[in-house]
Image (cartoon, grey):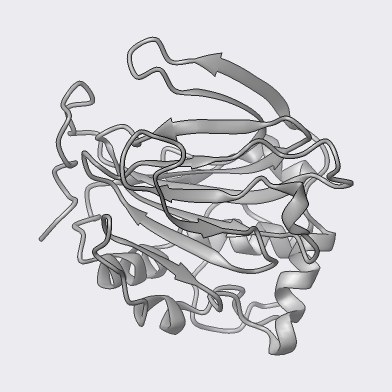
Amino acid sequence: MTDGPRPTGTLWSDGYDPVLDLSALRRAELTERPYRWAELPDTLRGAQGRTAHRLETEFPTRGFRLTERTDRETGKTYRTRNLPLIAQGRPVAGSRFALSPLWRRLVDELASSEYRAAVAEATGCRLEGCFIEARAVRYGPGYWISPHTDRPDKVVTQLWYFNSQWPANWQGTLRILGSPAPDDVRAEITPHQGSSVLLVRSGHSWHCVTPVSADASQDRRTLLLHFVDPAADTTAGGPAPGAEK
């Protein structure tokens, strides 16, 4: 298999359908409160969640690196383990050894122009000048991301979750916040298998991931993708240039 993206919307040469359901993504309805975002239950193809289940069971296990740091400018703190999948808009060749064929197809579709167009239609954002960054993320017990807004160059973020079981006492939820206060919760999303979240960056798009409980018997498994505008002023506090049409 080549490292470059392959077209979506048609059968693969090996007989598999596309992994992403781009029509479902285009139909996404974003709320405006407290900023523009949406939770999407069905953006992966496959009857009865079979594709999501396969992606969960085949979620990468090798090549992850621990990242734990404090951003001195924003105060953002986090601890996660990450495997880069797409950098500067191209699949990361050095990570493909860790991916199953299904995950490789998903990465190729995410790097495609068809996926970009679907997200642009869903969000109303100008994404033609952006490049894609994506990574697989594992959150073990005690891992977290503190309340933050994304950098101004991250115009749109999409996440997918791959845990078929995630009891409430395991915590590790995505919180949509109305302010930097971690208890100013406007919505709370449990990482259910195959579900997805779209976030449009703004100066008040606060969110966080609560610490995963020591009771969790498995990692919180996430696919994280950003549309990054290289022309954005990352020192500015307002929306990224492509954030609204």
Picture coordinates of residue 51, whole percent (x, y): 72, 75
Query: Quick one: which residue is furthest to the right in this view?
Result: 217
**Residue, x 89% and y 46% (percent of image)?**
217
Q: Is residue 29 left or right of residue 138?
A: left
Closer to the camera, 146 or 230?
146
Q: Is residue 13 left or right of residue 36?
A: right
Closer to the camera, 103 or 239?
239
Query: Quick one: which residue is furthest to the bottom in this view?
Result: 47
Above or below 25: residue 236: above
**Residue, x 73% and y 30% (percent of image)?**
142
Q: Quadrant of residue 191?
A: bottom right
User: How many numbered marks appear?
Assistant: 0
Picture coordinates of residue 151, whole percent (x, y): 31, 32
Q: Quadrant of the N terminus?
A: bottom right
**Residue, x 65% and y 69% (percent of image)?**
194
Query: Quick one: which residue is furthest to the front in this view?
Result: 183
The answer to whether residue 64 is visible is: yes
Picture coordinates of residue 157, whole percent (x, y): 40, 50
Above or below 205: residue 8: below
Q: Quadrant of residue 140?
A: top right
The answer to whether residue 15 is visible is: no
Q: Quadrant of residue 16?
A: bottom right
Above or below 10: residue 19: above
Picture coordinates of residue 127, whole percent (x, y): 25, 55
Q: Quadrant of the C terminus?
A: bottom left
Query: Quick one: which residue is furthest to the left in this view?
Result: 245
**Residue, x 35% and y 36% (percent of image)?**
150
